[in-house]
Amino acid sequence: MGAGKAAGGVAAAATAPGACTAGIFLWALGWRGSPFALNLFKCSLASLGFLVVALAAAGGTGAAAGGSWSGGGGLGSVPSVAAGWLAFSGLLGIVVGDNAWLMSLQILGPRRVVFCDNLKPFLAAAVGRWWLGEDLSAIPLLVGVLLTAAGVTVVSLEKARQESHSVNKGRRHEVWGWAAAVANVSLDTVGTALTKIHGSRLTTWEINLVRFGSASLALLLIAFIGNVWPLVRTAVEALPWKYCRGRPSPPQGHELQALENSSSHERGVGAEGVTQESLDPAAVGVKLGPGGEVLQASDGEDFELTRGAWARLPSMPGRDWACVTLGVALTTFLCPALGNYALFLISLPAWATLGALGPMYALPLGWLLKREPVTKRAVFGATLAVAGVVPLALHES
């Protein structure tokens, strides 16, 4: 491989997290729905973009170089075996891995999740050595990985210094949090290795089309189940008891009166203490919609508690949709396009290390957009990370 191509791979791998970070800032400004709905929207929209560009970039009769910008015989020439493995890698890294990351972040908090995330370059080094057969014995590569990982860790921990250490203090919850964090790192690394193995004859657009397209189909299926299941459950709950097998017949007469009196005393209120006013939502500051769903709490904050709302796209102004769409173009389209281009030009640990530079870009973006302060420790960490990029670039070139 020529030095020019390797340098282009290093530049693309280092630029990709910048595009990703900028898109995440835009999502923070505009998105008003659930994380699952955002994952569904970004994967579906990016898949359409990859389809258009893959069709436009197709040309020639032979196979394309892995991760190239153009060439190949088009979508019809993609081997079914390669497509299957790429779809599997998308399921591991995008569907399962992203949700595991969100779960670990909710349970452990950002500080410990950041620590686990920065183990990815070292896991990538092991996978690259033992699975892909890459030569990782060079000192500049090891020095670059160590310096960059250390710098990213310092910056990330400094940015998360004010965040809660753990949302759930229970040992069982923390075990699940650590398991989810390790699963995210492992599945993402395995998915990347599968992409490098089975995408070696496809363009970056074709690779991303298969991975994000399959992920969007899986998410659509989950969303469908999430929207249909509450309707089925509501219908089942509304069935009369006489049509449900295995349920006792409804109590009648004095039995019903006894149950009502017993239930009232268990709540600490006599039967005469339950009035229409105590059951009126307006009395406790809750506003109900036409279907009985909660629309507004007593503090005036609007929110949805409708079953299945997590699996539906939110209702937002056009300006917010434009902001989120631009974020998708940067985070879910440009970032993986650059990343998969670089994946076939440099070694896996170097790729994983450069792909973790997002916190470096978050420093200036946070200062420009949110006026977040930049501490001396953050500057020191950024200096370490940038210093580590130099030996990485020299080794790959």
Image (spheres, grey):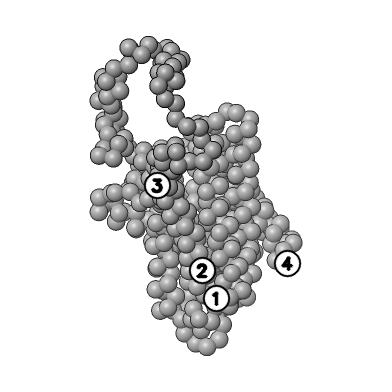
**Residue neighbourhood size for the residue with mark 2, other residues' Cα within 10 Å, grouped as few (<14), some (14–19), many (≥20):** many
Q: Rounded to the nearest whole Å, what is the CA distance between mark 1 and mark 4?
A: 21 Å
**Eyeballing the image, is 332 above or below 302?**
below
Q: Residue at x 36, y 41 (%)?
A: 306
Q: Which of marks 1 and 4 is nearer the N terminus?
A: 4
In the image, which disc is placed on residue 133?
A: 4
Left or right of 270, for residue 136: right
Residue type at mark 3: give it.
Leu
Q: Which residue is label 2 attached to? A: 210
* Mark 3 neighbour class, 10 Å CA radius: few under 14, some 14 to 19, many 20 or more: few
Residue at (46, 81) in percent of width and height: 58
Is 148 drawn above or below residue 296 in the view shown? Answer: below
CA distance for labels 3 and 2: 32 Å
N-terminal of the pair, mark 4 or mark 2, is 4
Of the residues shown, which amino acid type is indicated by label 2? Val
In the picture of the structure, the residue carrying the numbered disc 1 is 202
Mark 4 or mark 3, which is nearer to you? 3
Residue type of the residue flagged with mark 1: Leu
Indicate which label's residue lies in the foreground, 1 or 4: 1
Label 3: which residue?
231
The residue shown at (40%, 54%) is 23
**Which mark sits nearer the N-terminus, 1 or 3?**
1
Task: Report the mark closest to the observer, 1 or 3.
Answer: 3
